[in-house]
Amino acid sequence: MKVEHYSFGKIIIDGKTYTSDVIIYPERVDSSWWREKGHYLQIIDLSDAVNAGPEILIIGTGYFGKMTVPKETLSHLESKGIEVHVEHTKKAVELFNTFQNDKGVIAALHLTC
């Protein structure tokens, strides 16, 4: 999977355009990702991604970085042995693309604010 383009509210992954938040798995894209508390990322919001067993999880907090990732969410992910990177979505996309051939990488990306 490769992210070919990202701008506010829009991402192109392997030639397909998405306009809602996504989780990019090694073999598929989940474009139905939403968070129970919107801009506050909880452990439950990442349960499918965690269950997929990634070595690395890249979290994109939005174009302006408005999505909050609380310490308890980070601690939970790290306790599962997951290396976590939290960045504004533009930077998260760049980081994801550096790992694109690594099967142990998942990206959860908030596309708007």
Image (cartoon, rainbow, N blue to C red):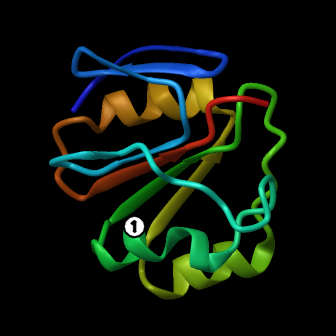
Secondary structure beneath dot 1 equals helix
Image position, residue 4 (x, y; %): 34, 13
Residue type pointed to by label 1: Ala
Residue lying at 48% horizontally and 29% vertically, measured from the top left: 93
Residue lying at 54% horizontally and 34% vertically, measured from the top left: 20
Decide if residue 93 is on the left or right side of residue 51: right
Image position, residue 102 (x, y; %): 19, 46
Q: Which residue is mark 1?
A: 49
Q: Nearer the viewer, residue 70 or 36?
A: 36
Residue lying at 71% horizontally and 35% vertically, measured from the top left: 62
Q: Is residue 92 above or below residue 13?
A: below
Image position, residue 54 (x, y; %): 31, 66
**Which image quadrant: the N terminus?**
top left
Residue lying at 51% horizontally and 53% vertically, measured from the top left: 33
Q: Is residue 86 above or below residue 83?
A: above
Q: Nearer the viewer, residue 113 or 100?
A: 113
Q: Tell me if mark 1 has few (under 14), some (14-19) or many (20+) residues whose alpha carbon lies within 10 angstroms of its own.
A: some
**Which image quadrant: the C terminus?**
top right
Image position, residue 11 (x, y; %): 46, 21
When asked about the image quadrant of residue 43, the answer is bottom right
Q: Nearer the viewer, residue 97 or 29?
A: 29
